[in-house]
Image (spheres, rainbow, N blue to C red):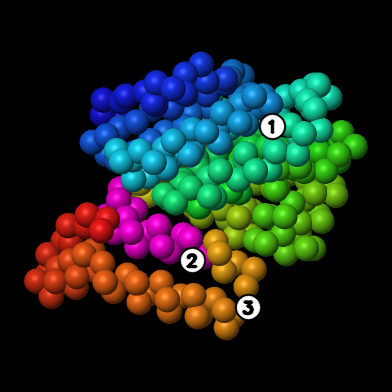
Amino acid sequence: MNAVTPIHASLTGLDGFRVEIDSARERADVILDRPPMNTVAMAQRDQLRKVFEALDEDDRVRIIVLRAVGEHFSSGGYIKGFLEASPEHVSKLAWNIAAPARCAKPVIVANRGYTFGVGFEISLACDFRIVSETCQYALPEQKLGQIPGSGGSARLQKIVGITRTKDIVMRSKRISGQQALDWGIATECVPDGELEAATDRLVDELRSFSPIAQRTAKKLLNDTEDSTLAIAIELEGHCYSRLRQSDDFREGVEAFHAKRAPQFTGR
């Protein structure tokens, strides 16, 4: 990467992860870094939410990448922390882990090795999941006498349906990177040594589009996931009409006719 700068000074002392911003590439990386398995502590979940919210407001950033140091993305949460946390704290877990989905900007996650529990759940909240062939997804909470508590089973069911979700959740079954691709969980599956390059390519591709069109598409798709077809089409029409008034749409049309690359500004 090019020169990187840290996240806003008000978000210091991050627990088990760090943030790097590459202004030249309009990219922010949220990097899980708690060797050897990148377990996610209870306090870390709230910090992750705050970081995603801060990056959403950072004008230097167009694309957010969630990744991890080492051979495993995350083995899941810090198990003992669940017994120590108050019921009120635990009730906020799903809201914190849903931060990538609420973020207006595109969020990519790069998964390799163990991606279990909350590691899988926060990955499901991202827009694009690039996985290596070593990736193993799992929601193993049944082995603890529990169920997923941060949106995992709900998000997964939307993607793969109730039959496959029961197979994964109720049997604590592991899903390989290739199977995740085949089932529509993963966006792309690549050899382990190519994970970073594939992530970089997607960042550059997404940066070539209009920021306002990207934000509109993400919000529309998220908002209409549970709506009827008629409502989804109606909302799509309103969003389309609004974007027709944007500078980026005019630039896109003019660039198309001039056979040149568009210079989008996000307005």
Residue at 41% across / 62% down in the picture? Answer: 216
> Which badge, 2 or 1, comes first in the chain's sequence?
1
Above or below for 1 versus 156: above
For badge 2, the amino acid type reads: Leu
The quarter of the picture where the C terminus appears is bottom left
Neighbours of disc 2 within 10 Å: few (<14), some (14-19), many (20+): some
Q: Cβ–Cβ below 8 Å for labels 2 and 1?
A: no
**The residue positioned farthest toward the right in the image shown:** 145
For badge 3, the amino acid type reads: Thr
Q: Quadrant of residue 185?
A: bottom right
Residue at 55% across / 61% down in the picture? Answer: 222
Above or below for 154 versus 141: below
What numbered label is drawn on residue 220?
Answer: 2
Chain part drawn in magenta = 204-221
**Residue 210 part of the magenta-drawn span:** yes
Mark 1, secondary structure of its residue: loop
Residue at 38% across / 35% down in the picture? Answer: 28
Residue at 29% across / 38% down in the picture? Answer: 60
For badge 1, the amino acid type reads: Gly
Q: Quadrant of residue 80?
A: top right
| Magenta span: chief secondary structure | helix
> Which badge, 2 or 3, comes first in the chain's sequence?
2
Q: Quadrant of residue 240?
A: bottom left
**Residue 193 part of the magenta-drawn span:** no
Q: Nearer the viewer, mark 3 or mark 1?
A: 3
The answer to whether residue 193 is visible is no
Which residue in the protein does label 1 denote? 76
Q: Is residue 179 left or right of residue 166?
A: left
Which residue in the protein does label 3 denote? 228
